[in-house]
Image (cartoon, rainbow, N blue to C red):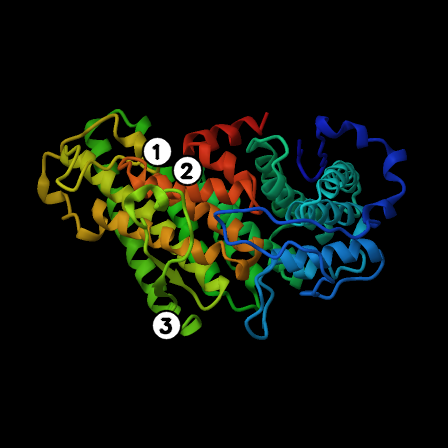
Amino acid sequence: MYQNATHGAVTNRSHSAHSSPAKSANRSKCGREGQVQGKGRGSLVPARNNTYKEPRLQAQVHGQYAFRDLFIADFLSIYLPKANGPATTPISWLQIAVNVPTAGAALNCAMSALSLAVVGRVRGNPALSIEGARKYGMALWELQKALWDDDLKLQDQTLAACMTLALYEVYECPASSLRGWITHARGMSRLVEARGPKMHRSPLAHEMYKEYRYVTMMENLATRNTAFVHQPRWSTEPWEGITKSADQKLYDLGSELSRILDGADASKLIQDPQQLLDHKISLISQCHDLDQRFGVWYEELEGEMPSPRYWPRFSKITNPVDRAGHGRVFPISLEYPNLQTAKTMLDYWVLLIILYSTILITYRTLAGVSGTDEGEYKPEHPADTQRAKVEVCPDRSRLPALADKYKPLNLFNIANNIAQSMEYMLSENTGVLGSSWALFALKAAIQCYQYRPGKELQWLHETLESLSLEEGPRLGHVYALAQWSETSKARHESKK
């Protein structure tokens, strides 16, 4: 378990066998593997080419450990999207991390663990996955030692090792629990905070920090919490002399939404009816202001991601729900020019779902309305805590009109956009990275349909299950079964 980075430690009892200095002294063991050949399996997710071939280097790797580099190169060819033109910026911080000449034992072991696990599963070689698990235990111990070392604990490679181990939890999820991932996510937070915002300007540190903001935004939205990273200096100082991209500007809005959700829960502590009424009306006003800022962001998106950002085409993906005699649930899928554009649009739609459902539920508690002609919409997240106590607003003139875009029909339309994007996100061209980026959006769409069960909800569940059980992140299976409240509970338990 991670401790404060200034005193830092990380332990994992399940890997205590690898926790002795004797077994970690020979650091070169983290990169000496042979070649592998395997067979692919049938999948709802479009199949990848699972036969071993000389890996195509998608990032130049350092040659200190030839065998380790070979597997890392193969991992990158599986993990990253297929290039559709020259890349001006890296799409993943891993593309920079593999080039660090002084990576250190923790990062070397962590990269070996992740590469072996993913390559072993995709290429159909369980022995490699087992070896990846062994390297994971070694990496935990090496990270522990780095956190004890005053010269290493705040270095880029130490943070990179922590983030790589978090990725291992995403793709392997060895304990079939969210706890391992949340533990590493909290470790990331402590390291980032201890380093301070100005230590995230180097190429590797900046790319890691951008990824960390995304992970933190997802966690905070799911658990209705705020974090230090939402403070203004953390959204400005790392970008001194660096242009902030559209997705990072979107995360600024996501941080504001987390703050609003955290404030919404404060109404549970308000006893005075008039204060409670004022608080909820203020909440609606804050949401409306944030919605306007989302509109401005979307208009400015044209400069960085010109239209069309997506377009329709006939779907080809297979799903058991489609074969159940009902025809295709989603006959049209959405195509994107590249993975970064797809991820930005999915993140945008997720934030809209959470924002609009907050407005909808808060409005209904004020108006004393429990359902509509469009069907009762009671999402578990983000406003379920408001449902227990319905307050009728005595002065309807203080209650702004509920716009159509905040009503259930539009929420389901946004969820449909997410569902129709899955064929692209899970395609071979997007790499394994595409499937991991699809997780949070897919979960948000499932939550949206949770209270209108039907073939759409079944389709979404089947897609998430197939994604998790095949080549995609196994954490998705646990994530699919967990409710938002359970995610919050796991986060709380990880503090113990």
Q: Residues within 10 Å of mark 1 (few under 14, many from 20)?
A: some
Q: Position of residue 455 (x, y in %)?
A: 30, 41
Three-letter residue code for mark 2 = Arg
Front residue of 85 and 45: 45
Residue position for label 2? 224
CB atoms at circles 1 and 2 under 8 Å apart? yes
CB atoms at circles 3 and 2 under 8 Å apart? no
Q: Position of residue 26 (x, y in %)?
A: 89, 43
Q: Position of residue 476 (x, y in %)?
A: 51, 40
Of label 1 and label 2, which has the lower sequence position?
A: 2
Mark yes or no: residue 144 visible.
Answer: yes
Residue 355 in the figure: left or right of residue 6: left
Tell me what residue is drawn at x 75 percent, y 51 percent: 36
Q: Which mark is residue 265?
A: 1
Three-letter residue code for mark 3 = Ser
Residue 81 in the figure: left or right of residue 12: left
Q: Residues within 10 Å of mark 2 (few under 14, many from 20)?
A: many
